[in-house]
Image (spheres, grey):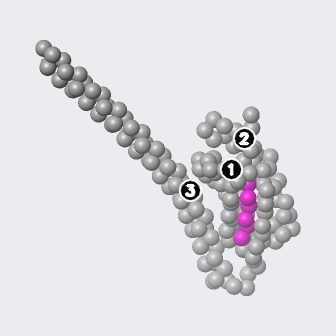
Amino acid sequence: MIRSSGVKQTLGALIIGMIFGATGVTLYAGHDLKTMHEQLLEQQQENEALETENTLLSEQVQNPNAEAILSSIRVDCDTPDDVPVQTAIKSRVQKNLAFLQGRSLQILLDHPDLPNRIIDPQSITVENRKFRLHVTLVIITNDELYVRVNGQLQE
């Protein structure tokens, strides 16, 4: 009898160890999958911006005497180390300023505060947290608009 209960205890401990091990592996794989999904979203957003920029630059090469147009919009987010929040904020800002892409740079030169007026009054909710958007930097170059946005967590 003593040998039988010892075998049962060993077998039970082995099964419990396998269950904990499988749970740990599943959690680790889920975390990796979430990270890869966030990276995929960020890469897709960057790819869309580059495709639009490529189209506008091709048009500019075909018609070199045309007035300067805005070919790309770059967005940077100051929110520290929170990839889902950064991705959501960048996506929102890109969408809100997308109407400027392909238009004359003169619009931005005449109204350099336009990105601030569009972005600053907005808030965005990500993962049940509300962030107030605030433009901290706008740079206008020959064919590019660079915007740095800060997402401040609201209580």
Q: Is residue 128 magenta?
A: no
The CA distance from mark 2 to mark 1 is 9 Å
Q: Position of residue 25 (x, y in %)?
A: 37, 41
| Residue 22, above or below 101 | above
Instruction: Tell me which label, 1 or 3, sits earlier in the chain.
Output: 3
Instruction: Tell me which label, 2 or 1, sits earlier in the chain.
Output: 1
| Residue 114 appears left or right of 22 | right
- The amino acid sitting under disc 1 is Thr
Q: Are marks 2 and 3 in contact (CB under 8 Å)?
A: no
Residue 130: image quadrant is: top right
Q: Position of residue 55 (x, y in %)?
A: 60, 72
Taking the spot 62% from the left edge, 50% from the top edge, the residue there is: 81
Taking the spot 19% from the left edge, 21% from the top edge, the residue there is: 6
The CA distance from mark 1 to mark 3 is 15 Å
Instruction: Tell me which label, 2 or 3, sits earlier in the chain.
Output: 3
| Residue 58, above or below 46 | below
User: Pointer 3: what residue?
Assistant: 42
Q: Residues within 10 Å of mark 3 (few under 14, many from 20)?
A: some
